[in-house]
Image (tube, grey):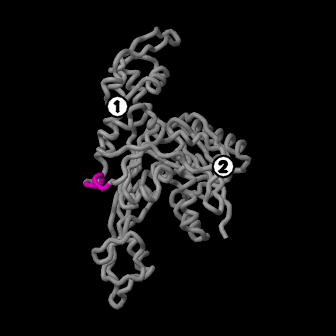
Amino acid sequence: MAKTRIHVGLEIGTTKTCMVVAEVKPDSSVKILGMGETRSAGVRKGEIADYPQVRACVKAALLEAEDISDVDINSVYLAVSGAHIEGLNNRGTFRLPEGEPEIAPRHIEEVKEIASDIAIPSDHVYLHSLIRNYVVDGQPHTTMPIGLLGKTLDADFHIVHGVRTRIQNSIKCVREIPLDVDDVVFSPIASAQIALTRKRKEAGALVIDMGGGTTDYVLYVGGAICASGCIPVGGDHITNDIHLVTHIPTSRAEQVKKTEGDASGNPERSIGTVVVPDEGGFPEMDIKRQILNDVIRWRLEETMQLVKARLPVGMLERVGTGVFLTGGTSLMSGFGELACDVFGLPVYRPEQPDVSGVHAYFKDPQYSTALGLIRYAQILDEERPDSRGKAKMGVFLRSLWPFGG
């Protein structure tokens, strides 16, 4: 019989550190019990730069989350990001032994092992090894082909890996709070669990999660991931560009970006000037709206082109749904129109998640990763309801964190 479970998601982002506590009920409904959030310090482009500051932020988010949810938190699902994390595709091939024409579970395990055994840099570690599809004697199968007859079994995998020490730093930070880590999840894979339904994954969709310091992306084709990665550029870079071009203080540049900027390229939205009030000795300034919008559009367009260039050749043409923008920077006026120009596809913002409880926060797309971790945990529960799955995860985490405790 299914049980009610409590799951906690933790995102240590460039802009914010966020911890979400949720109750997953036997009927699969999700109730948000509470959330702790603090402005991040010591994080640069999604990675830990000042360890004590980051640890203090996680501790503050924990205390707030426990206070609001009235739950004693012992473990979390941890999102990680950074330009060091890469995704790649690999195919493994297994020839069935003579006299064994029927595909058995052991053959599936064999081909999975072959497909997952790829050369990655010596200082990297596997984060995810995700099946895309199986092929039996040249015929693709989206489901496990146990019981079919064949001679050759192929498995296509999407494998995500990153620098071991950088991932270990995030785990170490959490364990010193002290909290256990249930799983480590690449941020865009978590975000996609909120942004996309199963039908959208099947039809093909690109999720772009643009935060303060990074732009994470994941591409689904035929229900499976075929590309993922991280560009170390985010909304903070747009703010800095505005500061450098106009010479207004960074705090004002951030405010003007949000309230006055537009990335669409529509000439009608670039008429006139923006008045920036005086602040701390800086005199009042007028900025041409055309200059402001050009700076925003140039940076966003460059970033979207970088994402596009990293997608496998021919895969974008197989996207039947469109592009889904999430993350705090996705709220930028005109961003959707710009993304439509770059990718030549319909652009959407994810619908509000179907959760109850303290969920007003989640109307804002900057919480997609944190809430996506809850959905990710829920999917794992459905796929591995017994203790064996947890044992496997324990082995994986020990490979990341071999120091015990």
User: Which-is-in-front pick, marks 1 and 2?
Assistant: 1
SS state under label 1: loop
Q: Decide which of 384, 175 is in the foreground and name it.
A: 384
The reply to whether residue 121 is in sight is no
Q: Residue 308 occupies which quadrant of the picture?
A: top left
- Is residue 141 found left or right of 78 in the rendered image? left
Task: Residue under label 2, please give it.
Answer: 178
- Is residue 58 found left or right of 328 in the rendered image? right
As displayed, is residue 198 above or below residue 168?
A: below
Which is nearer the N-term, disc 1 or disc 2? 2
Task: Residue under label 1, please give it.
Answer: 264
Percent coordinates x, y for residue 344 in the rendering: 29, 44
Q: Residue 341 occupies which quadrant of the picture?
A: top left
Question: For the view shown, which residue lies furthest in the front direction?
Answer: 268
- Residue 392 part of the magenta-drawn span: no
- The quadrant the C terminus occupies is bottom right
Percent coordinates x, y for residue 332 in the rendering: 43, 32
**What's the amino acid at mark 2?**
Pro
Q: Assess disc 2: are there few (<14), some (14-19) or many (≥20) residues with their C-alpha within 10 Å of its C-alpha.
A: few
**What's the amino acid at mark 1?**
Ser
What residue do we see at 41% from left, 76% from top?
108
Q: Assess disc 1: are there few (<14), some (14-19) or many (≥20) residues with their C-alpha within 10 Å of its C-alpha.
A: many
Q: Which residues are magenta?
A: 314-318
Percent coordinates x, y for residue 394 in the rendering: 57, 63
- The quadrant the N terminus occupies is bottom right
Instruction: In the rendered structure, find residue 254 and report the number of the disc placed on it.
Output: none
